[in-house]
């Protein structure tokens, strides 16, 4: 692979966003099953999987969210030029999206494609994960972690920009309340426990 970023699991496959390809890997063997390519410069970034196993991937260069169907990536949601689609998370009733240039947290109606801004000013938004209380953790690539409540209130939980420590796509263990944040250029994954204040 060339520049793997977001990942998601559907069935026995791991799907990885890799610039202009969505790579499917057999979880048990580690072997690449196939590479699904897109023309142009989609800059594929994050992957999310629906409860039915459907796979979606965001394109930061194209400002499109694609759906994988029958081995083909099809555009299902389109944004505005310059937004830079990044983190995505599929819920039963909606698609959640954060934009790195627009610094916005949005929800998308799966039926109509209508986008609604839930929150703003979340830095150079990179990744999004639910925390199990109706809120979400988002990361900012330059080095910040935010908590976005269900009603859109934004609180900065961590700021590592001064020490030049990036915050890439996170993961969150809801049971243990532990957040995992890849630092990218620092070549480490940091773990933080989320506590109520």
Image (cartoon, rainbow, N blue to C red):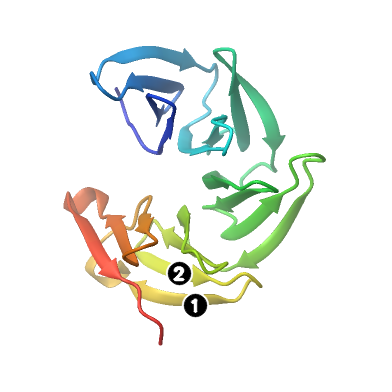
Image point (61%, 45%), residue name: 82
Between discs 1 and 2, the one toward the N terminus: 2
Image point (36%, 12%), residue name: 33
Q: In the picture provided, is 186 more to the left or to the right than 197?
A: left
Number of residues whose C-alpha sits closer than 10 Å to that of mark 1, classed few (under 14), some (14–19) or many (20 or more) = few
Image point (48%, 32%), residue name: 44
Residue sitting farthest toward the left: 187
Up-down: is 192 above or below 38?
below
SS type, badge 1: strand
Q: Which residue is mark 2?
A: 146
Q: Does the CB distance between marks 1 and 2 fall below 8 Å?
A: yes
SS type, badge 2: strand
Decide which of 53, 149 is in the foreground and name it: 53
> From mark 1 to mark 2, how far is it between C-alphas?
6 Å
Count how many numbered circles sit on residues in the image.
2
Q: Position of residue 172 (x, y in %)?
A: 37, 58
Q: Position of residue 1 (x, y in %)?
A: 29, 22
Residue sitting farthest toward the bottom: 197
Up-down: is 68 above or below 190?
above
Q: Position of residue 9 (x, y in %)?
A: 41, 33
Q: Which residue is mark 1?
A: 155
Q: Position of residue 155 (x, y in %)?
A: 49, 77
Up-down: is 148 above or below 169?
below
């Amino acid at each position: 692979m060339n520049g793997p970023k977001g990942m998601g699991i559907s069935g026995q496959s791991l799907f990885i966003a890799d610039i202009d390809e969505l790579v499917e890997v057999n979880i048990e063997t580690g072997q690449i099953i196939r590479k699904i390519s897109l023309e142009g410069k989609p800059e594929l970034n994050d992957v999310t999987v629906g409860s039915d196993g459907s796979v979606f991937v965001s394109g930061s260069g194209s400002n499109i969210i694609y759906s994988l169907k029958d081995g083909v990536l099809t555009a299902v949601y389109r944004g505005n030029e310059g937004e830079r689609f990044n983190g995505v998370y599929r819920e039963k009733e909606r698609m959640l999206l954060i934009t790195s240039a627009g610094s916005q947290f949005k929800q998308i109606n799966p039926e109509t494609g209508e986008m609604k801004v839930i929150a703003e000013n979340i830095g150079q938004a990179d990744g999004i994960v639910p925390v199990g209380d109706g809120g979400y953790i988002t990361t900012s690539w330059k080095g910040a972690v935010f908590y976005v409540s269900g009603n859109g209130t934004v609180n900065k939980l961590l700021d590592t920009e001064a020490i030049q420590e990036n915050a890439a796509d996170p993961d969150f263990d809801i049971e243990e309340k532990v957040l995992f944040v890849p630092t990218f250029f620092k070549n480490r994954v940091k773990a933080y426990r989320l506590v109520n204040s």
